[in-house]
Amino acid sequence: MKKLRLFVAACVLALGMSTQAFAATSIGLNLDWKYAENSKINTGKAVLYTTDASKSKDITVAVNAGHGTKGGESVKTLCHPDGTRKVTGGSTAAGAIKATAVSSGMTFADGTPEATVTLEMAHILGRKLLKDGYNVLMIRTDSDVQLDNIARTVIANNKADCHIALHWDSTNKDKGAFYMSTPDGLKNMEPVASYWKKHEKLGESLISGLKAEGVAIFSGGSMDMDLTQTSYSTIPSVDIELGDKASSHSEATLDKLADGLVKGINTYYGFTK
């Protein structure tokens, strides 16, 4: 049933809903782009979908379905562009200079891989954003894309106005949603120093949108984490954790989460109703 839902979601986004057909363009990593030389896995393609809504917002949202790169765990990339050490733990320990290029993610309590759910979530969110007048840069459109976290981030930097990576946490508490905020130890390192306040504003907006939809929020809605994505981002960029391995990932739940994220994006860009 899960595979069928994922297939249907992919077809709906790629081919458009009954009254919509979205233009699609493949986007690869240009090795001349800033920080691209630090990427190790970059033969894959993202896909840029252009809205056909009557009123385009002229804003492109990079929707990054977390994980989903075969072989990504066997490759290491620099945590920070300047080669400094990681300041917090996570999937890679604090103090490391290199991190896993792309982790495989966790497995939900019912046995579903996180990468499957993040992809389904990305398709649902992408469809809603297109309908609402946003262009969508889908970093991953199927079960595998050969783009590491640096390549994903650099493509988003150059082809989108903001970057939202979709994840679920590895805990087993059904603790609610939160975003990965910027640790103090990164705030003086470029490009983080120039963008972290925008990252935080986007994260807070997403949490407010989720809260408005009745989604449970963990703690204050954020947790400091030193992420490759944050370290390389030159646009507003957030890793949003939409629950954990004990959380529901039913179609109805994902739809509600997507509605909350769209509300948050509209809040961030000032399109509140």
Image: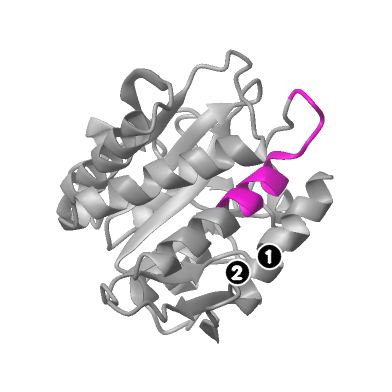
Mark 2 is on which residue type? Leu
User: Which residue position is annotated with label 2?
Assistant: 13
In the rendered image, residue 125 lying in the magenta stretch gets the answer: no
Task: Give how far apart the Cα atoms at labels 1 and 2 are.
Answer: 5 Å
The reply to whether residue 157 is in sight is yes
The image shows residue 52 at horizontal and vertical percentages of: 41, 81
The image shows residue 174 at horizontal and vertical percentages of: 57, 17
Q: Going by the image, does 101 lie left or right of 208?
A: right
The image quarter in which residue 13 lies? bottom right
- Could you classify mark 1 by the number of other residues whose Cα lies within 10 Å: few (under 14), some (14-19), or many (20 or more)? many
The image shows residue 123 at horizontal and vertical percentages of: 59, 59
Task: Please tell me whether mark 1 sits on a helix, a strand or a loop.
Answer: helix
Which of these two is toward me, 124 or 239? 124
The residue drawn where x is 47% and y is 73% is 37
Task: Please tell me whether mark 2 sits on a helix, a strand or a loop.
Answer: helix
- Do labels 1 and 2 touch, CB within 8 Å? yes
In the rendered image, residue 118 lying in the magenta stretch gets the answer: yes
- Could you classify mark 2 by the number of other residues whose Cα lies within 10 Å: few (under 14), some (14-19), or many (20 or more)? many
For the magenta stretch, what is the residue range? 109-121
Relative height, residue 27 to residue 269 (above, below): below
The image quarter in which residue 58 lies? bottom left
Residue 10 is tagged as 1
Query: Where the N terminus falls, by quadrant?
Result: top right
Mark 1 is on which residue type? Ala
Which of these two is toward me, 125 or 65? 125
The image shows residue 155 at horizontal and vertical percentages of: 45, 72
Relative height, residue 124 to residue 212 (above, below): below
